[in-house]
Amino acid sequence: MGKTLNLLGNILWVILGGLETAVAWVTIGIVLCITIIGIPFGVQCIKMAGFVVWPFGREVKRNEGGAGRFILNLLWVIVFGLALAISHIIVGIIFAITIIGIPFAKQHFKMIEIAFAPFGTTIVDKK
């Protein structure tokens, strides 16, 4: 039953904006990868796109990090992360106003962690 609900949620998510958002993330990721110095950030954008397009039934796991991940996450927060996290908070609150929107709000709240600091995270299927 859970997998069926996840599939239905993901289909609705894609129809209601998930596909457009994922395409935007991939486009930004490709542009960043073209700049050579932006490759680490571009890879994270593409990772985010994969999560954004199909979030139901998946979760973010944080791995052990070192100084490199800390520095990259710090740069990410300054340039992208804070604005992205705030946008997910705002959109999540808007979705949470309606009962039908609550599952979508939960997905936006789940995306805050990876939008804020993506380095050192992995996206895994829920068991």
Image (cartoon, rainbow, N blue to C red):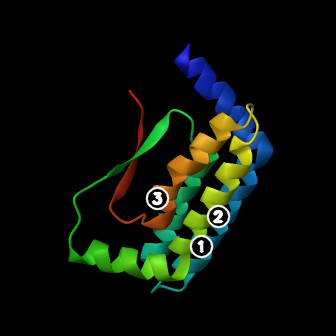
Q: Indicate the position of residue 103 as horizontal and vertical percent values.
A: 64, 35
Looking at the rendered image, the disc whose residue lies closer to the viewer, 3 or 1, is 1
Disc 3 is placed on an element classified as: helix
Q: Residue at x 58, y 56 (%)?
A: 49
Q: Which of the image's four quarters has the C terminus?
A: top left
Instruction: Note whether 54 is above or below 126 in the view shown.
Output: below
Q: Distance between the residues labelled 2 and 1?
A: 6 Å
Disc 2 is placed on an element classified as: helix
Instruction: Report crowding for label 3: few under 14, some 14 to 19, many 20 or more residues within 10 A (C-alpha).
Output: many
Instruction: Name the residue type under label 3.
Output: Ile
Name the residue carrying label 3.
114
Disc 1 is placed on an element classified as: helix
Which is more N-terminal, label 1 or label 3? 1
Instruction: Note whether 61 is above or below 114 in the view shown.
Output: above
Q: For residue 25, which quarter of the picture?
A: bottom right
Name the residue carrying label 2.
87
Looking at the rendered image, the disc whose residue lies closer to the viewer, 3 or 2, is 2
Instruction: Report crowding for label 1: few under 14, some 14 to 19, many 20 or more residues within 10 A (C-alpha).
Output: some
Residue 83 circle label = 1
The answer to whether residue 58 is seen in the rendering is yes
Q: Distance between the residues labelled 3 and 1?
A: 12 Å
Contact check, label 2 and label 1, Cβ < 8 Å: yes
Instruction: Name the residue type under label 2.
Output: Ser
Q: Residue at x 63, y 27 (%)?
A: 7
Instruction: Name the residue type under label 1.
Output: Ala
